[in-house]
Amino acid sequence: METRSLIARFVKFGVVGASGFVIHGGLLYLLRDVVGIDQYVANIVGFVAAASSNYFLNRWWTFRSHEEQMVQEYLRFFIVSVVGLGINSGTLWILGRIIPSWNSEGDWHFYILWLVAVGVTTLWNFFGNLLFTFREKN
């Protein structure tokens, strides 16, 4: 795959990811703060909805997949997403231990650590999906 094509896919992947961020955050707020559902349940619902939306948008727009076995492809995407969630949480935890003063409640520095974790996770998710979920068949 040529570099320009890879960069274009990465940019599209980022746009799709941003839409997933809005879906996840919007559902989290709606379910937790408006409906009153437990925040952890609301977070899971938001994550699943965002991952599902991201799958379909990435399938159609970013990777232009024609895989006939959509259920298996979706499951591969979801596995990559769940591992990404673990990488995000792990990166955030490690960075919080390296710079503990930035990890205190109410401290805006936490969001810098979170953005670094999102960057690491984005790279994992992109390449995991490129090489595993939407791999091109020879």
Image (tube, grey):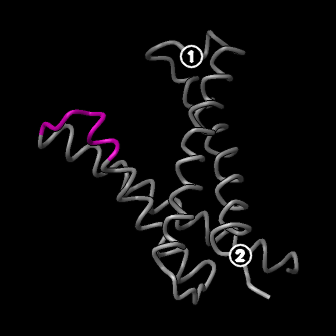
What segment carries the magenta color? 36-44
Q: Residue 121: x percent and y percent?
A: 64, 46
Q: Residue at x 55, y 31 (%)?
A: 111
Q: Alpha-carbon neighbours of circle 2 within 10 Å: few (<14), some, or many (≥20)? A: some
In the picture, which quadrant includes the C terminus? bottom right
The residue that label 1 is drawn on is 103
Q: Quadrant of residue 128?
A: bottom right
Say what amino acid the circle numbered 1 marks. Answer: Asn
In front of the other: label 2 or label 1?
2
Q: Earlier in the sequence, mark 2 or mark 1?
A: 1
The residue that label 2 is drawn on is 135
Q: Residue at x 30, y 34 (%)?
A: 40
Q: Residue at x 63, y 19 (%)?
A: 96
Horizontal arrangement in the rendering, residue 48 relative to residue 33 (left or right): right
Horizontal arrangement in the rendering, residue 11 relative to residue 50 (left or right): right
Q: Quadrant of residue 77?
A: bottom right
Task: Find the distance from the CA under tag 2 to the CA under tag 1.
Answer: 38 Å
Is residue 133 a member of the stretch shown in magenta? no
Vertical order, 57 against 45 (above or below): below
Residue nearer the viewer, 108 or 40: 40
Horizontal arrangement in the rendering, residue 62 relative to residue 105 (left or right): right
